[in-house]
Amino acid sequence: MSHIQIRDIHKHFGANHVLRGVALDVAAGQTMAIIGASGSGKSVLLKVILGLLPPDSGSVEVDGVESVNASRRTREQILRKIGMLFQGGALFDSLPIWENIMFRYRQNVDMDKAALRKEAKDILAQVLLEERVLDLYPAELSGGMQKRVGLARAIADKPEILFFDEPTSGLDPITSGVINRLVRDATKRLGATAVVISHDMNSVREIADRVAMLHEGKIIWQGTVKQMGRARHPVVRQFVHGLASGPLTEQYEIKK
Amino acid sequence: MVQLLQIPGRAALAMLGEIGRLSFFIGRTLFWLAQPPWYGRQILRQMLDIGYFSLPVVGLTTMFSGMVIALQSYTGTERFSAEGETSVATVVVLIITRELGPVLAGLMVAGRIGAAMAAEIGTMRVTDQIDALDTLSTRPMQYLVIPRVAAATLCLPFLVLIGDTIGVFGGYVIAVYQLNFSPSAYLSGTLEFLEAFDVIIGLVKAAVFGFIIALMGCYFGYYSGRGAEGVGRATTNAVVYSAILILILDFIITGLAFAR
Ligand SMILES: Nc1ncnc2c1ncn2[C@@H]1O[C@H](COP(=O)(O)OP(=O)(O)O)[C@@H](O)[C@H]1O
Ligand SMILES: [Mg+2]
């Protein structure tokens, strides 16, 4: 099983200093939720971990191997362990669903089209989608179905590490419930180490073992899901309980 | 005073940055062009789109250009020359093969294909599909950029060759049916002064234009700004810059080839 160590990551875009020294450990087999307000840099952090964005400074180790500024070969080896569900699904518009799901899988095996489709069908079944979806294109699916196909693509070649960027954003509560369960089941089945980004507290309670809160570019709090409910930290308290007033919304409040 | 200088200064810096980024992109394109794997299916798909589906537009524009040149050169030359028949044919074929064939095809394909490439790749950028490719162990340069650049560079010469033929045919139609020239005189006038060199330079231009169109489409799409606005700007830039570069390079190639 895989573990991830994030040390002192800084990242800025122009004057926007998004990450200001993020440090976080994700233990093997653990599911870590990262919570935080919109625009707090959760997706950026994930892209830094994946090596999609170079950080200004800091280090990310996956199973003890440095991934920041890694050689192409090292990065390939790390990426092969990882499955990622992007925030909007990021399905390839120009490919039918079965080719989306098998996109990486087929690179490493010598299988004919029928066998690949059969495999894709089995993976689709794991996310509770029917065979008829195989030949549709992403644009023909609802948002919830796209997320499920994205999940199917992420788990297709049995990664040791899974990343989920807001798996339930933009979905109705019932579909969200289904996605939460699928995410949890898939992670358990693979025995994977997982990082879930979310600002949906139900989702966090359902999926995660541990929670870390990203605020103003830093991890300001972390603990178990249970501890989260009782957390004293005012920012965490406001976020977790969705309170209208508190440190997160200070700038909107009328000064007396 | 300082403020007055700041604005052009910043613009100049931004332009230098852009040129640097573009040079880096060209370098990477040329590097990956030579590295396997080549995604054959992607190349074929692009060739179909660029070559086959551009035929109607290119055919129509070169056809009418051939017709117009025939008319213009007749009304122009009859004032000082009695040998209208052969000179009309010669003017048509030379202008079409050397200049208008490649330039018109280039501009048309820039509008059709360059814009579509920028929009498609830009959309892939803003919806994280390019990042998804990367995490799925596929290099976006190899999977997206190389097939488009290769297909456009290979296809445009064929497109232009067909366009040239249609353009000459357009001239023939006008000469024979409107100006009442004899078909055989027109055909011999077409071939008499035409050299293989003219055609080859036209095709070299076509290949260069194809490269430029795909390069601009991919470049602006690849670095598309965020959101629908970013993709829109990428699309416009791809068309504008490829059109400008086509006209500049046309001048340069013509100068190198025919200035003696
Ligand atoms: N590629 C980029 N270029 C410039 N700014 C970016 C880029 N990606 C993200 N940002 C900025 O970084 C901040 C954090 O974004 P993001 O990580 O997407 O937030 P979230 O926590 O909602 O996922 C935002 O202010 C966003 O505008
Ligand atoms: Mg995000």
Image (cartoon, helix red, strand yellow):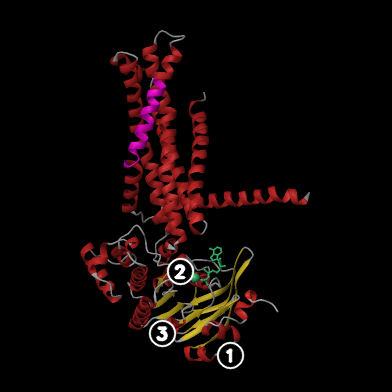
On the image, the x and y values in percent for residue A50 come to 47, 70
Identify residue for label 1: A232
Identify residue for label 2: A75
Q: Distance between the Cα atoms at labels 3 and 1?
A: 22 Å
Q: Is residue B68 magenta?
A: yes
Crowd band around label 1 with a 10 angstrom C-alpha radius: few (<14), some (14–19), many (20+): few
Q: Quadrant of ligand 1?
A: bottom right
Query: Which numbered dot is residue A206?
Result: 3
Between B145 and A223, the residue placed more toward the observer is A223
Q: Residues in magenta?
A: B52-70
> Vertical placement of A154 versus B112: above or below?
below
Q: Which SS type dominates the magenta stretch? A: helix
> Vertical placement of A214 versus B97: above or below?
below
Q: Amino acid at mark 2?
A: Arg
Residue A53 visible in this rendered orientation of the protein:
yes
Q: Quadrant of residue A100?
A: bottom left
